[in-house]
C-alpha cells in the first residue's frame, strides 16, 4: 500500500513531464496541499529537474526569454522569492535534522582546494558532512534554503550548460530576471524587511572538528549566524544600543542575505584558468567538462548587476546599528578584493572585440559607488537632477573607497592602456569604450583623490605631514600585498612613465580621429550619389557602410575620439608642447578597406533591387578587399530568396507553378511556340526556354560529370512576391478605399490595365518582329574593383 509520501512523489514526477505552464501550476498546488513529510522527497526531485542535474538541460532558464511571455512570466512567478519554490524551502526549513547533500565537485575550484588542504572558511565549516574515515568530504550538508541557492548559483557556471548554443547572445532570460529579483529581495535598498519573517534556524548537526582551525568549532545547538558579522552583535539575547528592533528579529534577515551574497560571490566571481584545473584532485573532475576562461555574456552582465546591487545596498545604510545595517557596513569591504581579482583576470583574458564592453561596464560600475546612492540627493544648491547623480560632490565620503580600492583604479587603467593602443579605435564600439573610460576618470575630484591616495606610497609624500596620506598608508600597502603579492612593483598612475605612455597614445587617437573623419566624409559623398529608392530602403532598414555598422554610428566616432583625447590631456595635465609634433595622417589602407567592404554591401543591395541579375556580389579575401559578381547558374526559380522578396509567397508560388507546368507542360510549350497573335501574347508572360548548368555531385563511386539542361517555356509567378509589387498593390487599394471604391474594383481595374498592356505589347511585337534571342546568355564572373 502506497504511503502519502509515495503518492506525493509520484504526482511530482508526473507533473515534471508536463509543459512549463502546467508543470508550474500543478507543482504549486502540490506544494500548497502537501505536508512537510510528503515534500521532503519532492524537493530534491524538483531541484534536479529544475537545474538539469540529471539531464543537463533543466527547465531552460538560460534560453527562455521575454519573447516567450507566457513561459517567462510563469517561471518567474514560480521561482520568485514569494513563489511556490521558496514556499517549499520555508516549509522544510524548521526541521533542523533535514539535510541535503550538495556535491563537492560542483563547488568552485578555490573552495575545493581549501577543502583538500583543510583550510576551510567559517561559512563552509558547519556544512561539512562528517564521513568517518574520509579526509576530504564528497558533499556538503545543507538546509533547503542553502541547497536551492547553491544550485541556483552553480546553474550559471555549470560547464555542461555552457556548451549549449546561443548562451552568449541572450541576457533577458528567466535566469537573469530571477537573479536580479533575488538580489533586490535579499539585499533591500529601502531598509525594508526581508519577507517572509521566519524564526531563527537551529543547527543541530555536529560539525567535523579540525585541528587546523579550533576557533571555528561550533556548538551543537548554537544559532547559525552570518560569518561576516561580529558574534557580539548577533548574540540572540543582546540588543544593540540605539536600535529599536531586537536583534532576535533581525537574525533571519541577515542570515539569508549573507548566504545569497557569499554563494553568489564564490560561484559567479571565480575566474578559473586552465592551469588551475590541472592542479586539482582528479577525483572531482572525472565527469565534469573543462570550463572556458571566457565567461558568457549573461554571466558578465550578472556580475555587473551584483556589483551595482552591493553598492546600492551599502549606500543605503542608515547607521541604526542593527544587524542588517552592520551587514551593509562591512559587506563591500569583505568582497571588494575578490571583485578586483575577477575583473583584472577577465580584462587580461578577454579577446579584442566589441564584447569587451561587458567587462568594461562591470569595472566602471565597481569604481563608481557614488552612482548608486538611493533616493533623491540634495546639495546646498538644491536637488540634484538624475543626470547629475553620477558625479562626486562629497570627496570626504568617497575617498575611503578610493583608497581601499586604489588598484582597481590605477592598476586596471594601466592594464587597459596598452589594450586600447592595440584596438581599432575607428570602430564605433571601441571608440565608445574609450570615451566611457576617459569620461569616468575626468570626473571632478576623482583624479585629485587618486593622486592624494597615491602620495601615501611615496616616502616623500609622508614627509609632507599630510593627515590624509598618513591615514591611507597602511591601507594601500596592505591592499597591494594581499591582492598582488610582495613582489608586485606598484607604478603610480600619474608617474612620468604612465604619462609618457598616454602621450604616445594621444597620437594613436589622433590618427584614428583623422581616419574616422575621412571615412565619414567618403561615406556621406557616396550616399549622396545613390539612387533615391536605394537610399530609402537603406534608411528604413538601418543599413549603410557595412553589415552591422550604420552611418549614424560612424558619425559619432570622431566626436568620441576628440573628446577622449581632450579628457586624457585634462586628467594627466599634459601640455600641448609635450605632445610630439609628428606628421599624423589618416590610415589610407584602413580607410580603403572599410570603403571596399561598404561597396560590396552596397552592390549586394543593388543586386537585390535588380531582379534581372541572377547573381550576387561577394567579397574576396585575397589581397585587398574587392567584390566579385557570382552568377547563379541553376534553375532561376530555385535561387535563394532575395532581400526584396517575400519568402512565404516565393515558396508557395513555386509549388503552384510546378503543379501547373507539370500538368499542362505540352500545352504551354505549344502555346509559346505558336507564330500568331496568340503566341505573341503568351510570350509576354511566360518564361522563355532556359539552359541551366548542373554541377558535378559526389556519389559513393566518385563524382558525376556536369551537364547542361534545357528548361522549356513555363509559367513563373515569382515576380508577384516582390515587395515593391506588393506595396504598390496595397497603396492602390488604399487610394481606392479613400475614394470610396472597393478593393475588388481596384484589382479588377488593375487586371484590365495589365491585359491591355500585354495585348498592346504583343501587337507591336507581332507587327514589328525582332531578331532578339529569347535565351538568356551566360554571364561570366568578373571582379569589381574600387
Image (cartoon, grey):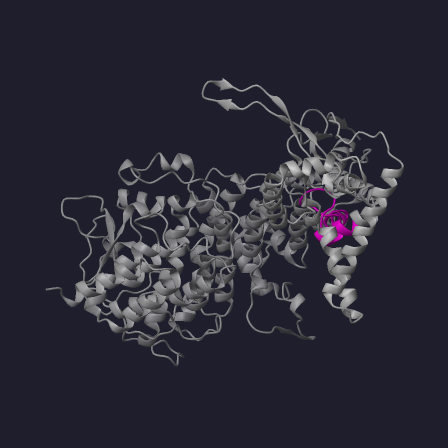
Magenta extent: 535-558
Which residue occupies the extreme bottom position in the image? 244
Residue 497 lies, with reference to residue 38, above or below; the image says: above
421 to 717, vertically: above or below:
above
Residue 167 is situated, as x and y percent measured from the top left of the image, at 48, 48
Residue 643 vs residue 281: left or right? right
Residue at 82% x, 47% y is: 759
Q: Is residue 272 magenta?
A: no
User: Residue 333 at what x, y percent from top left?
Assistant: 45, 58
| Vertical arrangement, residue 96 with respect to residue 408, above or below | below
* 538 falls in the magenta region: yes
Which part of the image, by quadrant, shows the C terminus? top right
Quadrant in which the N terminus is drawn = bottom left
In this picture, residue 701 sits left or right of residue 469: left
Looking at the picture, tell me which residue is in the foreground, 657 or 238. 657
Looking at the picture, how far across and down is residue 355, in whole percent?
58, 45
Q: Position of residue 425 (x, y in %)?
A: 69, 41
Q: Main secondary structure of the magenta part?
A: helix
Q: Quadrant of residue 658?
A: top right
Q: Residue furthest left?
A: 1
- 265 left or right, relative to 635: left
Q: Quadrant of residue 274 in the image?
A: top left
Amino acid at each position: 500500500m502506497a504511503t502519502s509520501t509515495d503518492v506525493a512523489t509520484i504526482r511530482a514526477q508526473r507533473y515534471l513531464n508536463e509543459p512549463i505552464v502546467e508543470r508550474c501550476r500543478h507543482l504549486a498546488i502540490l506544494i500548497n496541499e502537501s505536508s512537510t513529510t510528503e515534500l521532503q522527497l519532492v524537493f530534491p526531485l524538483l531541484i534536479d529537474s529544475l537545474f538539469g542535474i540529471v539531464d543537463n538541460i533543466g527547465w531552460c532558464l538560460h534560453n527562455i526569454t521575454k519573447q516567450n511571455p507566457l513561459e517567462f512570466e510563469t517561471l518567474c512567478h514560480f521561482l520568485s522569492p514569494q513563489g511556490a519554490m521558496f514556499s517549499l524551502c520555508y516549509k522544510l526549513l524548521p526541521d533542523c535534522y533535514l539535510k541535503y547533500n550538495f556535491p563537492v565537485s560542483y563547488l568552485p575550484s578555490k573552495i575545493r582546494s581549501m577543502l583538500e588542504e583543510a583550510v576551510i572558511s567559517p561559512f563552509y565549516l558547519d556544512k561539512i558532512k562528517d564521513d568517518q574515515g574520509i579526509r576530504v568530504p564528497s558533499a556538503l550538508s545543507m538546509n533547503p534554503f542553502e541547497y536551492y541557492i547553491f544550485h541556483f548559483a552553480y546553474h550559471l557556471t555549470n560547464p555542461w550548460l555552457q556548451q549549449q548554443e546561443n548562451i552568449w547572445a541572450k541576457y533577458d532570460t528567466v535566469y537573469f530576471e530571477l537573479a536580479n529579483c533575488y538580489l533586490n529581495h535579499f539585499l533591500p535598498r529601502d531598509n525594508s524587511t526581508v519577507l517572509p519573517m521566519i524564526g531563527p534556524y537551529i543547527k543541530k548537526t555536529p560539525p567535523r572538528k579540525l585541528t587546523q582551525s579550533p576557533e571555528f568549532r561550533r556548538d551543537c545547538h548554537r544559532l547559525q549566524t552570518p560569518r561576516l558579522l561580529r558574534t557580539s552583535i548577533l548574540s540572540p539575547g543582546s540588543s544593540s544600543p540605539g536600535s529599536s528592533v531586537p536583534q532576535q528579529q533581525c537574525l533571519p534577515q541577515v542570515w539569508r542575505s549573507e548566504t545569497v551574497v557569499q554563494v553568489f560571490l564564490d560561484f559567479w566571481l571565480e575566474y578559473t584558468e586552465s592551469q588551475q584545473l590541472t592542479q586539482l584532485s582528479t577525483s572531482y573532475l572525472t565527469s565534469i567538462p573543462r570550463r572556458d576562461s571566457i565567461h558568457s555574456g549573461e554571466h558578465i552582465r550578472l556580475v555587473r548587476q551584483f556589483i551595482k546591487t552591493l553598492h546600492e545596498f551599502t549606500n543605503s545604510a542608515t547607521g541604526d546599528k542593527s544587524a542588517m545595517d552592520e551587514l551593509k557596513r562591512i559587506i563591500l569591504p569583505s568582497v571588494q578584493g575578490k571583485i578586483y581579482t575577477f575583473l583584472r583576470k577577465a580584462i587580461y583574458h578577454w579577446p579584442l572585440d566589441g564584447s569587451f564592453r561587458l567587462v568594461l561596464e562591470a569595472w566602471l560600475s565597481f569604481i563608481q559607488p557614488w552612482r548608486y546612492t538611493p533616493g533623491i540627493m540634495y546639495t546646498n544648491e538644491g536637488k540634484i537632477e538624475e543626470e547629475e547623480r553620477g558625479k562626486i560632490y562629497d570627496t570626504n565620503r568617497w575617498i575611503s573607497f578610493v583608497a581601499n580600492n586604489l588598484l582597481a583604479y590605477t592598476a586596471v587603467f594601466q592594464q587597459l592602456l596598452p589594450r586600447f593602443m592595440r584596438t581599432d579605435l575607428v570602430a564605433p564600439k571601441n571608440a565608445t569604450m574609450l570615451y566611457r573610460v576617459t569620461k569616468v576618470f575626468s570626473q571632478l575630484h576623482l583624479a585629485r583623490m587618486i593622486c592624494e591616495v597615491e602620495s601615501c606610497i611615496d616616502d616623500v609624500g609622508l614627509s609632507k605631514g599630510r593627515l590624509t596620506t598618513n591615514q591611507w598608508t597602511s591601507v594601500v600597502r596592505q591592499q597591494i600585498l594581499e591582492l598582488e603579492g610582495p613582489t608586485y612593483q606598484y607604478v603610480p598612475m600619474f608617474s612620468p612613465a604612465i604619462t609618457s605612455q598616454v602621450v604616445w597614445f594621444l597620437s594613436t587617437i589622433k590618427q584614428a580621429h583623422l581616419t574616422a573623419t575621412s571615412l565619414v566624409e567618403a561615406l556621406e559623398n557616396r550616399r549622396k550619389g545613390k539612387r533615391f529608392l536605394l537610399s530609402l530602403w537603406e534608411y528604413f532598414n538601418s543599413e549603410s557602410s557595412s553589415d552591422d555598422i550604420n552611418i549614424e554610428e560612424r558619425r559619432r566616432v570622431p566626436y568620441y575620439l576628440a573628446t577622449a583625447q581632450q579628457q586624457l590631456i585634462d586628467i594627466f595635465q599634459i601640455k600641448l608642447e609635450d605632445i610630439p609634433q609628428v606628421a599624423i595622417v589618416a590610415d589610407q589602407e584602413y580607410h580603403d578597406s572599410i570603403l571596399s567592404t561598404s561597396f560590396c554591401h552596397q552592390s549586394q543591395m543593388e543586386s537585390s533591387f535588380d531582379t534581372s541579375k541572377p547573381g550576387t556580389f561577394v567579397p574576396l579575401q585575397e589581397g585587398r578587399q574587392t567584390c566579385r559578381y557570382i552568377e547563379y547558374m541553376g534553375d532561376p526559380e530555385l535561387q535563394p530568396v532575395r532581400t526584396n522578396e517575400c519568402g512565404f509567397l516565393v515558396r508557395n508560388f513555386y509549388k503552384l507553378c510546378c503543379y501547373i507546368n507539370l500538368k499542362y507542360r505540352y500545352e504551354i510549350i505549344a502555346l509559346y511556340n505558336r507564330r500568331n497573335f496568340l503566341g505573341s501574347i503568351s510570350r509576354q508572360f511566360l518564361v522563355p526556354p532556359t539552359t541551366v548548368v548542373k554541377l558535378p555531385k559526389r556519389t559513393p563511386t566518385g563524382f558525376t560529370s556536369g551537364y547542361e539542361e534545357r528548361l522549356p517555356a513555363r509559367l513563373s509567378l515569382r515576380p508577384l512576391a516582390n515587395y515593391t509589387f506588393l506595396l504598390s498593390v496595397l497603396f492602390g487599394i488604399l487610394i481606392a478605399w479613400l475614394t470610396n471604391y472597393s478593393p475588388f474594383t481596384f484589382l479588377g481595374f488593375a487586371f484590365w490595365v495589365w491585359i491591355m498592356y500585354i495585348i498592346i505589347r504583343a501587337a507591336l511585337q507581332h507587327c514589328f518582329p525582332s531578331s532578339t534571342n529569347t535565351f538568356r546568355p551566360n554571364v561570366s564572373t568578373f571582379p569589381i574593383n574600387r
